[in-house]
Image: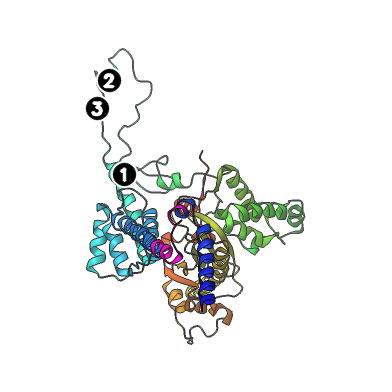
Amino acid sequence: MAGQTLGESQVDSTKGVSTKESLEAELQKRFEHHDPYEMIRELKVIFETHAAVESYEASKQFFGCMMEEGSSVSEHVFAMSGHARKLSDLGIVIPNQLGIHRVLQSLPPSYKNFVMNYNMQNMNKELPELFSMLKSVEVEIQKEHQVLMVNKTTKFKKQGKPKKDLKKGGKKAAAHPEKPKGGPKPDTDCYYCNGKGHWKRNCPKYLADLKSGLVKKKKGKVLSKTQGPATAEERERMNQIPYASAVGSIMYAMLCTRPDIAHAVSLTSRYQSDPGMEHWTAVKNILKYLKRTKDMFLCYGGDQELVVTSYTDASWNTDPDDSKSHGYVFILNGAAVSWCSSKQCTVAKSSTESEYIAASEASSEAVWMKRFIVELGVVPSALDPLVIYCDNMGAIANAQEPRSHKKLKHIKLRFHSIREYIEDGEVKICKVHTDLNVADPLTKALPRAKHDQHQNSMGVRYLTM
């Protein structure tokens, strides 16, 4: 019995020594004369106190976080999500409704009307859906501020004596009549857009159509197979042009750092077997655009929380050859990390089916992306469902529907894999406004203002030191 007690004491002493050796120098000195039981009990008290202090600081940051007027709503929502996630790691779970109310309470006065409408309509939204709504409101608020600044322009009167009119009886007669001052008259004709009330030099359409190096796409002018060489002379001339080499060089830049030209490269690469002069002109315009924007790169950074988000889109019935265009983009830390602009492997019968197929293709890439970042271990939210934003409610409803019906019975079975991914919690599909869909320039040509907006959202910006 004594031997057994002695053996247990030896084991306890051995455990105590090994535990003490693993502690820091300060704790070793503190627990030098403690037995293992007392040491464990006191360590438990110390760490419980530390956890209580840490949870207090985290809750203080969460409930005290307020958005400043004019700051980015994206950074604010990401910061709030980070504080909520930190509380969840400490064992304090914030309910979804409480988190939504806290985000609304932290908004500045410029969002007052939105908060009032949200509460009056009793909207029960998830955080990604609320985030999309706040982005739309932020764009509208910025437009209102720009209009106010334009209207507040102050006019100053010139000081000094006015000049005398030069008449026939004066010292000198006017050689040329003076130009009218004060702007064009309301009935002034514009010979560029056939409108009234402005000249060509300040015509909005003329200013928007000025040559800026973008891919030139005239109204009603699209690339198609019918634009190939019609005669043997034209085909012989095109054989002397390095069309395929130029497209390959541009494609290398697109795959590495320039997702903004993905759709243009996808279009021009379809006609490498029999290109025409219209196709070659489009390739040269892409090269001009790259030359004028050679200082633009993918710029990462700015997001306080590492979260992967995906946008998907499809363009149905816009291609004269076929209706198979689709694209998606994955964004991490403020810039794109994966993107695609290509043709679908099948022809859809409606825009909803086309969007559904595009979302299914994006979900397969999302599952691979999620498993990759889980293995990296650097993204805190890697285990959460990866959010895929789509701008078609019909496609979202079909993706979340676990049953098949006659509307979708003719779609290939492999495209229904998105339902399994959603059911397993791998991905989550949410609605986004069409104007905020970052994947829009990967499927169609856009006006310059909208193209620049999505280009900036992809992280393609000018590199500033």
Residue 250 percent location from the top left of the image: 65, 52
Three-letter amino acid code of the residue under disc 1: Asp
Q: Residues within 10 Å of mark 2 (few under 14, many from 20)?
A: few
Q: Which mark is residue 60?
A: none
Residue 460 drawn in magenta: no
Three-letter amino acid code of the residue under disc 2: Asp
Q: Nearer the viewer, mark 3 or mark 1?
A: 3
Residue at 58%, 57% (x, y): give it: 262
**Residue 51 occupies which quadrant of the picture?**
bottom left
Residue on which disc 2 sits: 165
| Left or right side of 209 for 46 | left
Label 3 – label 1 distance at C-alpha: 27 Å
Residue on which disc 3 sits: 157
Q: How many marks?
A: 3
| Left or right side of 15 for 232 | right
SS for tag 3? loop
Would you say the magenta stretch is mainly helix, strand or loop?
Answer: helix
| Left or right side of 350 for 60 | left
Q: Residue furthest top?
A: 171
Question: Does any portion of residue 319 appear in the rendered image?
Answer: no
Residue at 54%, 73% (x, y): give it: 7
Q: Residue furthest front?
A: 2
